[in-house]
Image (cartoon, coloured by chain):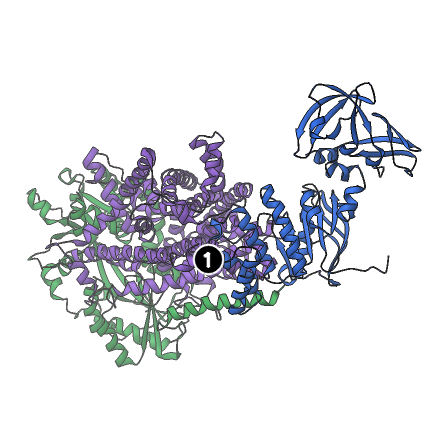
Chain colours: A blue, B green, C purple
Amino acid sequence: MAEQHFGLLGLDDISVRFGGHQALDGVSLDVAEREIVCVLGPSGSGKSTLLRVVAGLQEADAGRVLLDGRDQRGVPAHRRGVGLMFQDHQLFPQRDVAGNVAFGPRMHKVARPERERRVEELLDLVGLPGAGARAVSSLSGGEQQRVALARALAPNPRLLMLDEPLGQLDRSLRERLVVELRQLFGELGTTVLAVTHDQGEAFALADRVVVMRDGRIAQSGTPLEVWQRPADAFVARFLGFDNVVAATVSGEVADTVWGKVPVPAGTAAGEAWILVRPTGVRLVHADEGLPCVVAARTFRGTHVAVTLRPQDGPPVDAACPLRDAPEVGRTVGVAFDASEVVPLASTAPTASTTATASN
Amino acid sequence: MSTNKKFTAIAVTTGFGMVALAACGGGSDSGSDSGSKTVTLVSHQSFAVSDDVLKDFEKKSGYQVKVLKSGDAGEAVNKAILTKDTPQGDVFFGVDNTLLSRALDNDLFTPYKAKGLQGIPEDQQLDAGKHRATPVDTGDVCVNYDKKYFADKKLDPPKTLDDLTKPSYKNLLVTENAATSSPGLGFLLGTAAEYGDKGWPDYWKKLKANGLKVVDGWEQAYNEEFSGSAGGKKAGADRPLVVSYASSPPVEVLYAKPKPKEAPTGVATGTCFRQTEFAGLLSGAKNEEGGKALIDFLISKEFQEDLPLTMFVDPVLEDARLPEVYTEFGTKIDKPYTLDPEKIAGNREDWVKSWQSLVLK
Amino acid sequence: MRLGLMAVPCVFFAVFFAYPVAAIVARGLRSEGAWHLAGFGEVLTDSGIRHVLWFTTWQALASTALTLLIALPGAYVFARFQFPGKQLLRAVVTVPFVLPTVVVGTAFLAVLGRGGLLDDLWGVRLDTTVWAILLAHVFFNYAVVVRTVGGLWAGLDPRQEEAARMLGASRLAAWRRITLPALGPAVAAAALMVFLFTFTSFGVVLILGGPTFATLEVEIYRQTAQSLALDTAAVLTLVQFAAVGCVLAVHAWTVRRRESALRLVDPATTARRPSGAGQWALLGAVLVTVLLLLVVPLSVLVARSFDTAQGYGFGYYRELASADGGAFLVPPVEAIGNSLQYALAATAIALVVGGLAAAALTLTRGRSRPGRLVRGFDALLMLPLGVSAVTVGFGFLISLDEPPLDLRTSWILVPLAQALVGVPFVVRTMLPVLRAVDGRLREAAAVLGASPWQVWREVDFPLVRRALYVAAGFAFAVSLGEFGATVFIAQPDRPTLPVAVTTLLGRPGDLNYGQAMALSTLLMLVCAVCLLLLERSRTDRTGEF
């Protein structure tokens, strides 16, 4: 481990304590130049603290923050050259839009004409051309978001950090903006470290997703890797997969409270946790498979999410085609597809993660 | 952290403040005495001298006079005593016979026999043996009356302390707190002089029974309660008798427009207690020679004749002429009450204490 | 960083407050090289002194409660309602602050005393009763509450209260549960200042209460200035210190539990024309209160300044311009210039010292609470309000007597002493607002490259600009009317307005009395105009949000 390589940003074993609460617990993370990394985690998992440590707003109790390989210990926030877009924007209420965007360049002593050019350019970039003279209080949520982004980009930070960048926006706007942002960052070649609790946002935006839990990194990988192979029950549940159950694997079959569940070939034998994706839950005749009562149906546009209650064990979520969805109260049989079953690392879900993952 | 910048910022801010201060103070006297050409007089807030009189002294003597005034007579003396190791000036003016002993016991003054002392009557020179304190002026604390009130009621105004306890003057007198007011104390000492150590409390009991009113200071007594004053008239005051000074009636005339034919107020001549104010050369004075010259000036004819119109007191110099307004509208008090400074010093605190519990409670 | 900011206020307080006060107390308790503490027992068991202590405390508590009761609706009206003449009225309510107590006594007696308004209407006379003292304290301190609390109130987002009402809270409940807690620190600060002012009340008690009432302050004055009983005075000063210390501790404790970052909004957007009978009635009630309690007494003075022997006219004012060889070396009107110079200097000092102190107090590392040291510093700044002017004045005399600090005869000592009273106002007015500034706004600026100084200039200053003006207004008014320091400090012949007024009132004669009234009127005018200018200046372009 002596030969450690760090990218643009390197976090080396960072720990932060607030009183009795361990906000960050030995976090190490690397962000390469032009990479977009998204830290995903429930609230309280320490992801915002992580950003504050990088920005220099919070001192780490242990560990190093490296930017371009240089230790940032003792470097105050305003000398780190990183940008941070705050969760609720924190636009300066006493300045207009242009005044907000121009703030960074002004602090860096950029001459006025250059500054004005930059403001104009950035407002064009974020899709608010000519909005410079508007009062901050007259902006809609989406517009504020764009101004905050323009403001964060204005001083050309070597690393841009986003704290719940799209948190307060409505869904359609959010989906559109995520695409725009990714495109924009690609064009600008910006290195981005974002934190969010919304997996959709993280998967759409990031080159790499880092899932955090209780101040530690639970899993790190491309969105696809994380999606396909959640490292453990916590990650699985956080990604919205509730069909997690304890199992004893032998060969290609696992023994669970739901009965026998087929597992992919090559799964290690022994005690394990397995995840069954809702798409791998097939409804069959009540006599066949695991008998369950339909507890709830939720229309999801492309499919219907059905919650099934077996006699024993946790409920089973299934995704049904629109036409095949059974009525609430009916008794159906459930069978599982081996291709949609994912064996997880053997950590048991704790009470706290169950609570946070369920919302 | 960017410590340098921060300290620069602090320095700039502080500097700005100081510049602002300096700008505000521009043109005012600087704090330090410039050599022995300046002589500093320390006094109470009531000290005053006409501009031309002071200029004249400065021209003749070659000294610049700086006057430091603060507080009333009592405060000023106490401050001088507190700072006697590092005096604020060269001469102190304004210690009266009620406080003289305190000043002398504290070695406030260096003896100096002023030029022109022979022109001052012997009975005013209370420290004649040692010449530490030089008498400068006298003032008489007397009961004043509202002439109009007594004319309207066809009542004779009181003349003596005894008169004040008579039923016809019930609820008419207002006086000041002897603990905080100089005339208030003077009046108390006058009664002590008349009725003796043992007798004065009885007299005050009678005064109280006769509807005496006590307020805290001269300003309220005269301006708010006394029906003969300008303020009292506007405030609808209902006390035609007040403890004030013998000089008050002529000053009423002096500060009236148009000039009245006679003073609106009169003096009960048998109620007066004499206060004598002294000056002295402060021990440790930086400019002793200048201080001596200043004391000589204080009893010079020019200053003595200026006194009545600036401080409303009487000169001690026998051949000083009183201004016309005093001779025409004032009353000469021939037999004021007096008390030996030693005696005052010995009893003051006790008397004031018993007076307070007797009259105020 | 914080230590750096604290250096200036610390040095200021050490040199111009702690050292002089310690010197005068030590002079009283020490003689011939030994401490004499036996006096404590003697003084504290004296029934007279215990009575004084009791009266001082309860009248201060009662005055504070009454002031809050009467002035809080005023603070609301000034913060939330838009009505013609608002700026002028806000300046007028501050005027009592600058008037010498002797003059206020006159004004109040005209309302409460013989032949006064109450006497005329109902035959009620309140002079020489404790009611006169309490009402006069309200008169003096109305502005403290209106300005301190109103300044923050105007910046509170009214939508918070609206949100609570949507959740089913009644108007009163919404106010009590949402606005009041947010205002808590400001109300506590105002209450603390009113308490300290009334606890150390001097002139009002003597003039309106009569010589039978005495506060600790009066007793200290008597023992120090009149009797030179420094030992007794020292004990009383320490008792006063202890009492003030207790109050400050209670204050610190209550405020610490309430402090929270608030989202402040542009005050201009929160004030609107009153609507509905209830709001109009409230506005009316406040205006009537201001009229009866403040305007009527003040107009008595104005009326008397025109009421000359030859009928109404400007006679007294003309006299002011002439130096007739009387007790002034200069025409009394020059006192205005002196007063303004002193007040400006004192305001500058108070703003620098108080501003740095407030900035130091709001700096917190990360999200930690302010430490004990900082809270101690916070309390220290308030102490001058609770210490007798005569103690400080006499302390100056015996402590600042050697080079390089021989300031006793320097003009600068007067504004320095006045600033001592002004600084707590600056700190108290600025702190609640500074603390209410969202810390993340500062962080946003820091991340964008602003150094701590730039953060203060770019983020804090624009948001607290209004509070700064309010604070400056207070500091200015305090020093304009400050009488204690000016009287206790010996100074070359440059009378300030209050000193000139008092000198005039100290002499018999119609012209002297009239000039005193005229000069008081001018003092009010100067104060009102200066405050108005101050209020105006914040509507300049940069002040617009």
> Which residue lies under the disc numbered 1?
A133
Residue A333 picture location, percent across and down: 79, 22
- In the picture, residue B64 is in which quadrant? bottom left
Asked whether A115 or C230 is in front, the reply is: A115
Q: Is C166 placed left or right of B59 in the picture?
A: right
Asked whether B62 or C174 is in front, the reply is: C174
- The answer to whether residue B13 is above or below residue A262 is below
Residue B40 can be seen, yes or no: yes
Residue C164 picture location, percent across and down: 48, 34
Quadrant location, the N terminus of chain C: bottom right
- In the picture, residue B111 is in which quadrant? bottom left
As drawn, the residue found furthest toward the front would be A323
Quadrant location, the C terminus of chain C: bottom left
Asked whether B296 or B162 is in front, the reply is: B296
- In the picture, residue A290 is in which quadrant? top right
- The answer to whether residue C248 is above or below residue C528 is above
Residue B300 can be seen, yes or no: no
Residue B181 picture location, percent across and down: 29, 51
Q: Specify the subunit that label 1 lies on.
A: A
User: Helix or strand or loop: what does disc 1 sit on?
Assistant: loop
Q: Is C29 placed left or right of C106 in the picture?
A: right
Image point 60% across, 59% down: which residue?
A153
Amino acid beneath label 1: Ala
Q: Is C319 placed left or right of B129 in the picture?
A: left
Label 1 crowd bin: few (<14), some (14–19), many (20+), radius 10 Å = few
